[in-house]
Image: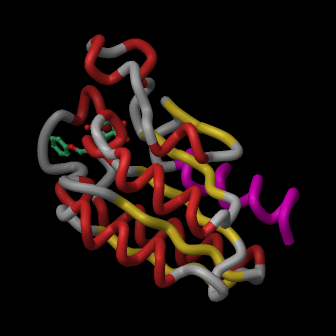
């Protein structure tokens, strides 16, 4: 099974500031968690992070016919991006939305998720472990 893990803007800055919200783990540690999960679960996992909405849309489009599942943390684009929502709908690859923080307990402007409307599941507030849970969910339901 091939899984594409997508991360949106500023996720590469994890661990540098705001540890109270996002934890003290770094982006490098997230990459290590993904590599470890791929090996343990016998999965092919590709990771892509971008600060640019169109680049994330391009990557979702390129996943068509190549990947069996998508794990996506659209970061701030969660709350604005109909383009990412449309791309996920267009490719119709099972996608799980992940948020490191519990966005349901945060500001009003974080209460809408557009990409989440095209996802089969949302995991939030579990820190980096949420990515592992999302991958295991896809393996269990779509392998
Ligand atoms: O909780 C999440 O995973 C978020 O997707 C993270 C986004 C935020 O805009 C979403 O509402 C929830 C932020 C990405 C990381 O931003 C940083 C901010 C300061 C220091 C390091 C990263």
In-front residue for pair 70/25 = 70
Q: Nearer the viewer, residue 104 or 33?
A: 104
Q: Height in image: 122 above or below 94?
A: above
The picture places residue 12, in percent across and down from the top left corner, at: 23, 61
What span is colored magenta in the figure? 129-143
Up-down: is 87 above or below 105? below
**What residue is drawn where x is 60% and y is 38%?**
122
Tell me which image quadrant ligand 1 sits in: top left
Which percent across, then down, holds residue 90? 56, 64
The answer to whether 10 is drawn above or below residue 126 in the figure is: below
Q: Is residue 130 magenta?
A: yes
In front of the other: 40 or 70? 70
- Quarter of the view holding residue 106: top left
The structure residue drawn at horizontal position 29% and vertical position 12%, both measured from the top left corner, is: 108
For the N terminus, which image quadrant?
A: bottom right
Q: Main secondary structure of the magenta part?
A: helix
Place of residue 10 in the rendered image (x, y in percent of width and height, measured from the top left)? 19, 53
> Quadrant of the image for the C terminus?
bottom right
Instruction: Determine the image quadrant of residue 57.
Output: bottom left
| Residue under the point 64% across and 70% down | 37
Indicate left or right for 82 with 132 as reference: left
Decide whether residue 3 is among the magenta residues.
no
Q: Is residue 90 left or right of residue 41?
A: left
Report x, y in % for residue 119.
62, 46
The residue at 86%/59% (across/down) is 140
């Amino acid at each position: 099974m091939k899984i594409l893990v997508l991360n949106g803007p500023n996720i590469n800055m994890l661990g540098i500031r705001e540890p109270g919200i996002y934890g003290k783990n770094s982006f490098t540690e997230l990459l290590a968690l993904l590599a470890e999960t791929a090996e343990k679960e016998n999965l092919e996992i590709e990771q892509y992070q971008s600060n640019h909405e169109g680049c994330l849309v391009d990557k979702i489009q390129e996943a068509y016919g190549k990947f069996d599942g998508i794990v996506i943390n659209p970061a701030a684009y969660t709350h604005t991006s109909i383009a990412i929502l449309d791309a996920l709908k267009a490719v119709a690859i099972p996608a799980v939305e992940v948020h490191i923080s519990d966005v349901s307990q945060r500001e009003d402007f974080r209460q809408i998720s557009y990409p989440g409307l095209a996802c089969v599941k949302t995991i939030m507030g579990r820190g980096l472990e949420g990515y592992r849970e999302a991958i295991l969910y896809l393996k269990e339901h779509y392998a």
